[in-house]
Image (cartoon, grey):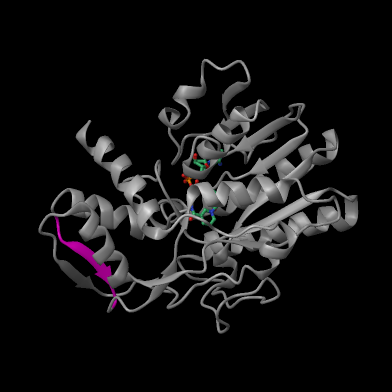
């Protein structure tokens, strides 16, 4: 049995990861400062003797005995990471340094939740791991994008310099139950607006595309990545290559929710990438993984979660 530390464990992805590990009968220490995470996401695990919850900010060092670290702490949506951009960079960079330092001390294997944002506004489509990206270093999104890029650098330097067992996954847009209702991410935005009977906001002309991975598929990939042989570091793209325009997504949400919402178009925010789609060839080969959940099925689960949440 392994002892796992999950930073950002009370957030959207982190809480699903806690669920899966506890289900597997493993020990989980969930660490979170509750900036965007919520105790309610893990409340159902609190009575379980395999599960512990600790309020802690990863920009400060942490001393605990663990075998594996999943480093997820970092606000993931633009509204939240732009709220305090300096803290966002600190969370990615100081957080990575603190968690890598811990991994080195206790000889733990460590996985970094990186992001497709490291590719910026890409010239190559879909994006393979070998692509270095096209990122603005001084824009409003840079605190997140460059923070995550620097965290990747630190992971690979600890790997080369200190022979740490590292794993880096680059996560593409993921959605599902426990997303934050006000985080401005497109799936939660559309669903919440449709459920409230409000018009659905589309930035730009709505022809820009995104790919959407359901949370269960994503967590499966993260767990498989953590179990890969010691010399496999990644970076590894994980996401769903199925591509949809914003207008298509809005129409699917409206057909699931019903109601009378209309589309409302607004100007595109700065540095918003036109297209983003993972090349998952490496994931197929290295972890024998590809997403299984169809968009409509994932959206149905997510709509049902938000319906309950909004009715409370
Ligand atoms: N969801 C996605 O589509 C997506 C895509 C790419 C990358 N990621 C990455 O996956 C990770 C989890 O994302 P998520 O969607 O679950 O977001 P989230 O905001 O729900 O979760 C992040 C968690 O980290 C916590 N946190 C933030 N700063 C912290 C700090 N300084 N110390 C301790 N905890 C802190 C938050 O309270 C929250 O619980 C993030 O690192 C994010 O960058 C997510």
From the viewer's side, name the closer residue of 22 and 130. Answer: 22
Residue 8 occupies quadrant: top right
158 horizontally vs 12: left or right: right
Q: Residue furthest left?
A: 260
Q: Quadrant of the N terminus?
A: top right
255 horizontally vs 1: left or right: left
From the viewer's side, name the closer residue of 195 and 158. Answer: 195
Residue 147 occupies quadrant: bottom right
Q: Is residue 200 above or below residue 59?
A: below
Query: Residue 300: where, in percent of width, then height?
Result: 32, 49
Indicate whether residue 258 is drawn in magenta.
no
Give the residues drawn in magenta, as a range: 198-204
Instruction: Tell me what residue is drawn at x 62 percent, y 36 percent.
Output: 6
Query: Residue 139: where, in percent of width, then height?
Result: 48, 70
From the viewer's side, name the closer residue of 110 and 187. Answer: 187
Residue 43 occupies quadrant: top left
Instruction: Tell me what residue is drawn at x 12 percent, y 54 percent.
Output: 259
Q: Quadrant of the C terminus?
A: top left
Question: Can I make out residue 184 in this image?
Answer: no
Indicate whether residue 199 is drawn in magenta.
yes
203 horizontally vs 114: left or right: left
From the viewer's side, name the closer residue of 289 and 88. Answer: 289
Question: Can I make out residue 205 in this image?
Answer: yes
Q: Is residue 124 above or below residue 251?
A: below
Instruction: Tell me what residue is drawn at x 68 percent, y 71 percent.
Output: 129
Report how many numbered discs are placed on residues in the image: 0
Query: Residue 37: where, in percent of width, then height?
Result: 45, 38
Query: Residue 83: where, in percent of width, then height?
Result: 41, 52
Q: Is residue 207 above or below residue 43?
A: below
Instruction: Tell me what residue is drawn at x 54 percent, y 51 percent.
Output: 217
């Amino acid at each position: 049995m392994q002892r796992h530390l999950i930073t950002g464990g009370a957030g959207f992805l982190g809480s699903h990861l806690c669920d899966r590990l506890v289900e597997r009968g493993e020990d989980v220490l969930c660490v979170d400062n509750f900036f965007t995470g919520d105790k309610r996401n893990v409340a159902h695990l609190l009575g379980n003797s395999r599960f512990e919850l600790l309020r802690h900010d990863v920009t400060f060092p942490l001393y605990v005995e663990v075998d594996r670290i999943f480093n997820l702490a970092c606000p993931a949506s633009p509204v939240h990471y732009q709220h305090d951009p300096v803290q966002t960079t600190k969370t990615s960079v100081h957080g990575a340094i603190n968690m890598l330092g811990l991994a080195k001390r206790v000889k733990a294997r460590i996985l970094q939740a990186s992001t497709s944002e490291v590719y910026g506004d890409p010239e190559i489509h879909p994006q393979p791991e070998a692509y270095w990206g096209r990122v603005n270093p001084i824009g409003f999104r840079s605190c997140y994008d460059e923070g995550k890029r620097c965290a990747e650098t630190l992971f690979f330097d600890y790997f080369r310099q200190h022979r740490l067992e590292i794993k880096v996954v680059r996560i593409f847009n993921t959605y599902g139950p426990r997303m934050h209702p006000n985080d401005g991410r497109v799936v939660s935005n559309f669903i919440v607006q449709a459920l409230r009977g409000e018009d659905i906001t589309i930035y730009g002309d709505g022809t820009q595309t995104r790919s959407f991975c359901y949370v269960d598929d994503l967590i499966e990939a993260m767990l498989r990545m953590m179990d890969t042989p010691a010399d496999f570091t990644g970076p590894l793209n994980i996401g769903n290559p199925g591509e949809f325009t914003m207008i298509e997504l809005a129409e699917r949400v409206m057909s699931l929710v019903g109601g009378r919402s209309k589309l409302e178009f607004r100007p595109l925010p700065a540095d918003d990438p036109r297209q983003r789609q993972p090349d998952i060839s490496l994931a197929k080969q290295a972890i024998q993984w590809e997403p299984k959940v169809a968009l409509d099925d994932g959206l149905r689960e997510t709509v049902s979660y938000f319906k309950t949440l909004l009715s409370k």
